[in-house]
Image (tube, grey):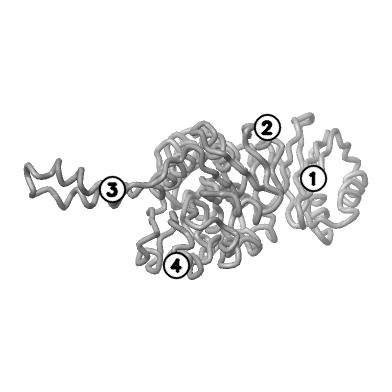
């Protein structure tokens, strides 16, 4: 019986996938095998020793202490692409809102409510205050060509925009899905110099914090517009407010309001609605649950942010799973220990990602507890688990 603790309200479409005869799912489980979370902050939460995995029903994972989890051999999963369509649709809306002062026009119209028969004439006289450019024919720069960036780029092409993409680490899968009409920028600066609109779709890390700042704004066209539905920290807040106030930039649309941004009239603040659709919540919950189940039952890893993608078809009755530091001779030490107790290996796979490696080893015989403890005692081994 696997025990799953939920830290937020999770879509029933996901939770209903857990077979009730093999899973216990609740928000108050004291020693769970896994945690299922959306936005709850786990940095200040004591994660029980029993936890094998944490699944985030969403793409971002800043609310999870990933480094600490890695040191304990806890797999951390996210659900990239589950909310991609929801965010992509908001990108299109953001481009329109930043181009034509739709929000200002709506607010102004409401002030005319008591003018009775004068309203039609007043609207015709005042509408020019809210005009703005069309998207067709303009240049969109997409920074980050993951699931969301690819969808935004493709839809912008369909709207008649010229699209430039920048992503030095684009995956093969993303490249296959990207429209051939999207051109590649060799550098971020090259993209910024050509774009009328820039939309960000990259994670927040030490290397991307403040990626767009005063230095980068100097490369951009006067009157360009920036859309940030990824993470607030990607844009230097003080620098963009200065660029907007000096009319270097025309507009900034962000899903991450702050008091300073709300005070700037050229900033359009959205209350973190990027993934706030019932469809996105359902998709992310389903993905998170499926990944957790496959990991708990088979040891398979897909969409982990801290451990390598790894899967092996079951070829034997017994399976050994090992998380270790990515250092030489780890596989050799494990197989030597197994050979020493006459355990026959039927199949094996080892993958690594940065500082960590993961092994799936199928064996003909059940591995004794003493042998599991011996493997676990090897320097560099972080976690050992056996499943039948």
Mark nearest the camera among 2 and 1 is: 2
Q: Name which of mark 1 and mark 4 comes first in the sequence.
A: 4
Quadrant of the frame with the C terminus: top right
For the residue labelled by badge 3, is the local secondary structure a helix, a strand or a loop? helix
Q: Residue drawn 41% across and 43% down?
A: 93
**Looking at the image, residue 5 lies above or below residue 245:** above
Q: Where in the figure is residue 202, as x and y percent of width and height?
A: 59, 52
Residue on which the image places disc 2:
176
The answer for how far apart the CA atoms under marks 1 and 4 are is 51 Å
Residue that numbered label 3 is attached to: 128
> Mark 2 to mark 3: distance in Å?
43 Å
Front position among marks 2 and 3: 3
Q: How many numbered marks does the figure carry?
A: 4
The residue drawn where x is 52% and y is 40% is 84
Decide if residue 125 is in sight here: yes
Q: CA distance from mark 2 to mark 1?
A: 24 Å
Q: Nearer the viewer, mark 1 or mark 4?
A: 4
Residue labelled with disc 1: 351
Compute the Cα span from label 2 to label 4.
Answer: 41 Å
Q: Nearer the viewer, mark 3 or mark 1?
A: 3
Task: Name the foreground residue: 77 vs 343.
Answer: 77
Q: CA distance from mark 3 to mark 4?
A: 23 Å
Q: Are marks 2 and 1 in contact (CB under 8 Å)?
A: no
Which residue corresponds to mark 4?
Answer: 246
| Quarter that holds the N terminus | top right
Work out whether residue 133 or residue 262 is closer to the camera in this orientation and state it.
133
Q: Mark 2 or mark 4, which has the lower sequence index?
A: 2
Mark 2 vs mark 4: in front: 4
Q: Earlier in the sequence, mark 2 or mark 1?
A: 2
């Amino acid at each position: 019986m696997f025990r799953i603790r939920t830290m937020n309200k999770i879509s029933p479409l996901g939770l209903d996938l857990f077979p009730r005869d093999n899973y216990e799912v609740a928000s108050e489980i004291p020693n769970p095998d896994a945690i299922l979370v959306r936005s709850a902050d786990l940095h200040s939460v004591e994660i029980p020793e029993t936890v094998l995995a944490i699944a985030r029903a969403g793409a971002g994972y800043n609310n999870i202490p990933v480094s600490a989890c890695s040191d304990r051999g806890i797999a951390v999963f996210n659900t990239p692409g589950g909310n991609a369509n929801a965010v992509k649709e908001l990108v299109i809306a953001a481009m329109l809102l930043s181009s034509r002062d739709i929000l200002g026009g709506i607010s102004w119209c409401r002030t005319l409510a008591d003018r009775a028969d004068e309203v039609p004439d007043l609207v015709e006289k005042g509408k020019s205050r809210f005009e703005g450019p069309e998207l067709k024919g303009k240049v969109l720069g997409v920074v980050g060509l993951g699931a969301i960036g690819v969808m935004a780029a493709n839809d912008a092409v369909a709207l008649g925009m010229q699209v430039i993409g920048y992503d030095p680490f684009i995956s093969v899968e993303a490249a296959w899905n990207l429209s051939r009409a999207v051109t590649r920028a060799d550098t971020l600066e090259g993209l910024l110099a050509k774009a009328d609109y820039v939309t960000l779709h990259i994670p927040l890390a030490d290397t991307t914090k403040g990626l767009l700042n005063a230095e980068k704004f100097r490369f951009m066209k006067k009157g360009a517009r920036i859309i940030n539905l990824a993470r607030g920290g990607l844009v230097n807040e003080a620098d963009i407010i200065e660029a907007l106030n000096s009319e270097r930039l025309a507009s900034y649309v962000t899903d991450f309001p702050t008091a300073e941004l709300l005070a700037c009239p050229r900033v359009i603040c959205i209350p973190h609605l990027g993934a706030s659709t019932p469809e996105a919540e359902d998709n992310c919950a389903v993905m998170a649950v499926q990944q957790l189940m496959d990991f708990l039952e088979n040891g398979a890893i897909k969409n982990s942010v801290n451990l390598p993608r790894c899967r092996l078809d079951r070829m034997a009755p017994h399976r050994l799973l090992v998380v270790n530091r990515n250092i030489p001779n780890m596989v050799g030490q494990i197989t030597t220990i197994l050979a020493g107790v006459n355990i026959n290996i039927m199949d094996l796979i080892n993958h690594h990602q940065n500082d960590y490696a993961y092994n799936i080893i199928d064996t003909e015989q059940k591995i004794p507890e003493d042998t599991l403890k011996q493997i676990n005692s090897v320097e560099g081994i972080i976690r050992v688990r056996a499943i039948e």
